[in-house]
Image (cartoon, grey):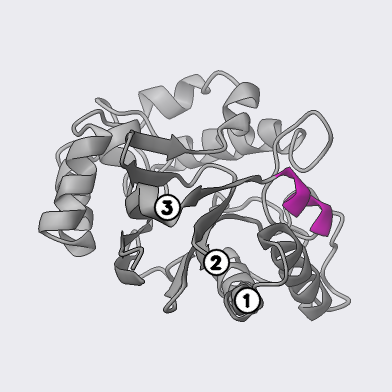
Amino acid sequence: MMRACFATAPRDPAWPNEDFVAATSHAALVVDGAGTPVGADTGCVHDVAWYSQALGSALIPRLAHTGRSLTDSLAEAISDVAAQHGPDCDLGHPGSPSATVTTVRERDGWLEYLVLADSPLVLDLSTGIDVICDNRVDLFHQPEPAAMRDHPAGSAEHTAALREYVQAWRQHHNREGGFWSASTTPDAAAHALTGSFPLTDVRAAALLSDGASRLADRFGLLTWRQLLDVLDNDGPAALIQSTRAAEDSDPNGHRWPRGKSHDDATAIHCRIDPS
């Protein structure tokens, strides 16, 4: 049995949340839209929030079909959303809306997982903690432009430099030898990290957008064990509140350089009862 609780919050109350979160009796899903800098061309009339919602809504019912692999289910969902684009959307544009996908599913005594791009899955196993995250994007990060370091996040100078930064790594997105995320190409699903663990070995699972994993993997304020303890003892909303407090302590990104001072944050905590 899977018992899941989750929380999600936009980076700014005035902006739409670009994350999607859902859970059923046997599955959990986090979709984290890849934010687009203000003024960047995407070739699409839809925004990232639309894409995340459309993809998550297409994928979550497919997870109920346990005869289909997670990879095939994701590929079908990506195709479904691609078909929802209209003639004014250039599906071949490198800036088309895209998202990470992290999901788990109980099936026949196993916990299956799929992780596409860099939203981590943190597993509390009988043998210890296992963090599964697709960090291939890090191989293609360019040095941050000086303006990103010298100007506060959200300033015109920082935003212009961020557009330049994003344009550089777009050249490696969803192509062989590069990094992959869900966008307009169903083939991306085949590049996800997948696997399974016996349910008897799994105590809990945490699915996190990168806005909710910051305290551990970017800020270094928590270990993964401590992050799981926060989720277990206080819940996902408390983790997000702690993340916001850390972000507020460094609004200009001097201590922790980052593209956005705040990010959409989503966390699901799943307790696993193999009986």
- Please state the extent of the stretch shown in magenta in the rendering: 185-191
- Report the residue at 71% width, 38% height from top: 170
Q: Which residue is mark 3?
A: 209
The three-letter code of the residue at mark 2 reads Arg
Which part of the image, by quadrant, shows the C terminus?
A: bottom left
Quarter assignment of residue 267: bottom left
**Residue kind at label 3, given as amino acid type:** Ser
Q: Say which mark, if any, is on residue 54.
A: 1
On screen, 180 above or below 71?
Answer: above
Residue 13 visible in the current orientation: no
Q: Earlier in the sequence, mark 1 or mark 3?
A: 1
Q: Tell me, yes or no, whether the two marked residues, 1 and 2, touch with CB atoms within 8 Å.
A: no
Asked if 186 appears above or below 214 in the picture, the reply is below
Callout 2: SS: strand
Residue 241 in the figure: left or right of residue 99: left
Q: Nearer the viewer, residue 76 or 42?
A: 76
| Dot label at residue 19 | none
Amino acid carrying label 1: it is: Ala
Q: Residues under labels 2 and 3: Cα distance?
A: 24 Å
> How far is mark 1 from mark 3, CA to CA?
17 Å
Q: Position of residue 226 (x, y in %)?
A: 17, 39
Q: Name the magenta segment's main secondary structure.
A: helix
Label 2 Cα neighbours within 10 Å, binned few <14 / some 14-19 / many ≥20 = some
N-terminal of the pair, mark 2 or mark 3, is 2
Horizontal and vertical percent for residue 68? 73, 69
Which numbered tag is attached to residue 107? 2
Which quarter of the rendered picture does the N terminus lie within?
bottom left
